[in-house]
Amino acid sequence: MDVDEENSVEPTETSSVITDNQNVASALGAISLQPVQPLAPPVIIPPIAPAIAPRPVVAPPLAPLPVRPSVLKPPSVTQNGDMRASDSDSDHDESGSGAMAGSTQEYEISEESKLVRERQEKAMQELLLKRRAAALAVPTNDMAVRARLRRLGEPITFFGEREMERRDRLRALMARLDAEGQLERLMKAHEDEEASASAAPTEEEEIIYPFYTEGSKSLLQARIEIAKYSILKSALRLDRARRKRDDPDEDLDAEIDLALNQAGSLVLDCSEIGDDRPLSGCSLSHDGEMLATCALNGVAKLWSMPQVQKVSTLKGHTERATDVVFSPTSNHLATASADRTARLWNAEGSLLRTFEGHLDRLARIAFHPCGKYLGTTSFDKTWRLWDVETGEELLLQEGHSRSVYGLSFHHDGSLAASCGLDALARVWDLRTGRSILAFEGHVKPVLGISFSPNGYHLATGGEDNTCRIWDLRKRKSLYTIPAHSNLISQVKFEPQEGYFLVTASYDMTAKVWSSRDFKPVRTLSGHEAKVTSLDVGADGQLVATVSHDRTIKLWSSKSSEKEKAMDID
């Protein structure tokens, strides 16, 4: 209605203008012709003009757009021309996409992508190897696993390797060979060799090669003598033990208490400067009348007891002396040195014999209880047994993976115990030459070792500041003593009955421990530097210690008894 009113007002205004100007009338005449068309004004109304109706029909490119993603042939059959156009468009699109793919293929792969791809490939290979290894048949018997490893030309065992680890190693090896295609060929070759070997035995195969090294005749004779000596000594020890057990008058606890009371009353009896250089070893004679010491200058000295007066000086080593020990049957003594030799001396200071053969410096030495043989330890990872009378090397014993430091002989003479920097203590049977026990427990090098006179206890001390008591019957550690605040340099049992144990340490003290319950009995403190060695008298009432402070100290319980007697008087 508004539109009609506007149209009605418009002609009145034009009629008034015509009277004024004739030219405007001609223009109005032309304009007046437009309302003649009744249908045009509603179609060409200004609000409808932006949305032109016929133009969307005229735009042909919009029609094939919905057909482009669906490349179905039924609609293409109805419209031949359209189908051809769409085919051409799709061809253009494919060629365009091909060009784009070609352009992407020209891009270089980054290093990170390569590393990721390599890791993925490696992980896939490991996964396939694990699957293949899980599918293989691996023997479960350890002997069979060792035999299979030997057939494949691999080591049958590694250091510290257990049975399951060895089986897993065989499984991984078989999986790797299977992946390379060599397992069947190798196994077949070994089976053929075994079959041919079993089918045609030769004379050479009848020869049995022993694992051990054949010893000399002198070693055989020494083993026979050691066996005879040990049988007699062990029989005497067992008879004495049975007598103490069966005799009602024997009170073992009272006897032990007496020995511990004497050990608890040890006091400093004498202190003497032993040398210009630090002392490294000491030893008391079997009768207790002499004391031997050695120092880092390579000189050993003999002292009379109990006044501690110098008797003689033993010079002969070219390097520092590491240990000195008296013979259990005579006044002969032996010294060890870093010049890789051990020397035998008499009480007058004369050199009797030199034992040469070690490839590195010597550590501790020990006499066999019969006095005929001398044992030496060395940093060449071996310990050796020598004939004292002839100076011949009877036995070269390996077995430690690192340097051998300490050595002790059983009081029966049948066994020897060695310890070293591999934190192991090994027990050897001198009659057969076999290693019968290996004690593991220390976490650092073991420096001191000693057999108890009771026959079944073994004490060791090392750099882990502990002293361990091992039971030979149970083959395990019986007790661990947290003995000192520094490393333990020497361990010695009381030589008569083994009722107490003495340890020396670098914490400048020596301590006495009960063998019954391994409780502390006495602390011998007086040295001003680390204590390197000690020895216990035959009667158990005297202890000698030497130190890096160059002093010799004697600890005695006899003097305390004398003082008590004087007090009573």
Image (spheres, rainbow, N blue to C red):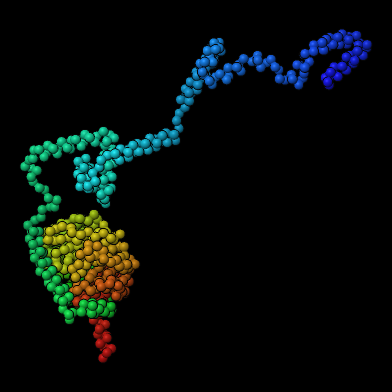
Query: Is residue 227 or residue 292 the one in the foreground?
Result: 227
Q: Residue at x 25, y 68 (%)?
A: 491
- Could you tell whether 50 is left or right of 174 in the image? right
Q: Residue at x 25, y 42 (%)?
A: 138
Q: Is residue 172 above or below residue 162?
A: above
Residue at the extreme right: 19
Image coords of residue 224 (percent x, y) = 8, 62
- Could you tell whether 126 is left or right of 215 in the image? right
**Visible residue check, residue 330:** no
**Visible residue check, residue 528:** yes
Q: In the picture, residue 302 is in which quadrant? A: bottom left
Query: Is residue 186 or residue 71 the one in the foreground?
Result: 71
Image coords of residue 348 (percent x, y) = 14, 72
Q: In the picture, residue 428 is in which quadrant? A: bottom left
- Could you tell whether 484 is left or right of 195 in the image? right
Query: Is residue 362 or residue 218 the one in the foreground?
Result: 218
Image coords of residue 520 (percent x, y) = 30, 73
Quarter of the rendering occupied by the N terminus: top right
